[in-house]
């Protein structure tokens, strides 16, 4: 997701060469600073990849739950149309919701 907006990789930062002027910065200071930047950049990249995986898993879970809701609505409509609306009680619905919550929260 966010990786498309990132222009540099840690390797590109590491391999960057700067021209040295007579009155330029000390090369050792620049190298030390870039080492810190590379380290942070690597951590950021890892965090982003991890978050992207979590997002993908949550999106899959949302799709499954939406499908389950559609199925339950269809079952409810069918039982209501056939006159058997008493078959699905509040207790049954609460049990189903509880099961869905267990599935969702166990994957986090």
Image (cartoon, rainbow, N blue to C red):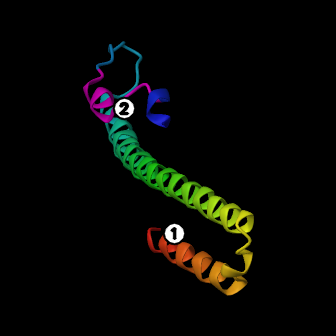
9 or 20: which is nearer to us? 9
- Rendered image: mark on residue 8: none
Residue that appears at 40% across and 25% down: 25
Q: Is residue 2 positioned above or below 63 on the image?
A: above
* Whole-percent x, y for residue 83 in the image: 74, 71
Q: Are marks 1 and 2 in contact (CB under 8 Å)?
A: no
**Range of the magenta residues?**
6-16
Residue that appears at 61% across and 76% down: 97
36 or 10: which is nearer to us? 10
Q: Is residue 102 positioned above or below 12 on the image?
A: below
Q: Which residue is outermost to the bottom?
A: 91
Q: Secondary structure at mark 1?
A: helix
Q: Mark 2 Cα within 10 Å, few/some/many (few <14, many 20+)?
A: few
Find out whether residue 10 is within the magenta segment. yes
Viewer-side label of 1, 2: 1
Q: Secondary structure at mark 2?
A: helix
Residue that appears at 54% across and 72% down: 100
- The Cα–Cα distance between marks 1 and 2, rounded to whole angstroms, is 47 Å
Q: Which residue is outermost to the front?
A: 82
**Dot 1 or dot 2, earlier in sequence:** 2
95 or 36: which is nearer to us? 95
* Whole-percent x, y for residue 106 in the image: 45, 74
* Whole-percent x, y for residue 12 in the image: 30, 26
Q: Which residue is mark 1?
A: 104
Q: Is residue 31 positioned above or below 93 on the image?
A: above
Find out whether residue 64 is within the magenta segment. no
53 or 25: which is nearer to us? 53
- Rendered image: mark on residue 30: 2
Residue that appears at 36% across and 32% down: 30
Q: Is residue 74 left or right of residue 13?
A: right
């Amino acid at each position: 997701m966010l990786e498309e907006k990132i222009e540099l990789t840690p390797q590109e930062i590491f391999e960057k060469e700067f021209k040295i002027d007579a009155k330029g910065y000390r090369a050792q200071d620049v190298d030390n600073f870039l080492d810190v930047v590379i380290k942070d950049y690597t951590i950021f990249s890892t965090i982003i990849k991890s978050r992207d995986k979590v997002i993908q898993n949550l999106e899959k879970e949302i799709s499954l739950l939406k499908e389950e809701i559609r199925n339950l609505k269809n079952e409810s409509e069918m039982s209501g149309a056939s006159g058997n609306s008493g078959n699905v009680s509040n207790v049954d619905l609460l049990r189903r919701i509880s099961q869905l919550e267990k599935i969702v929260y166990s994957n986090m």
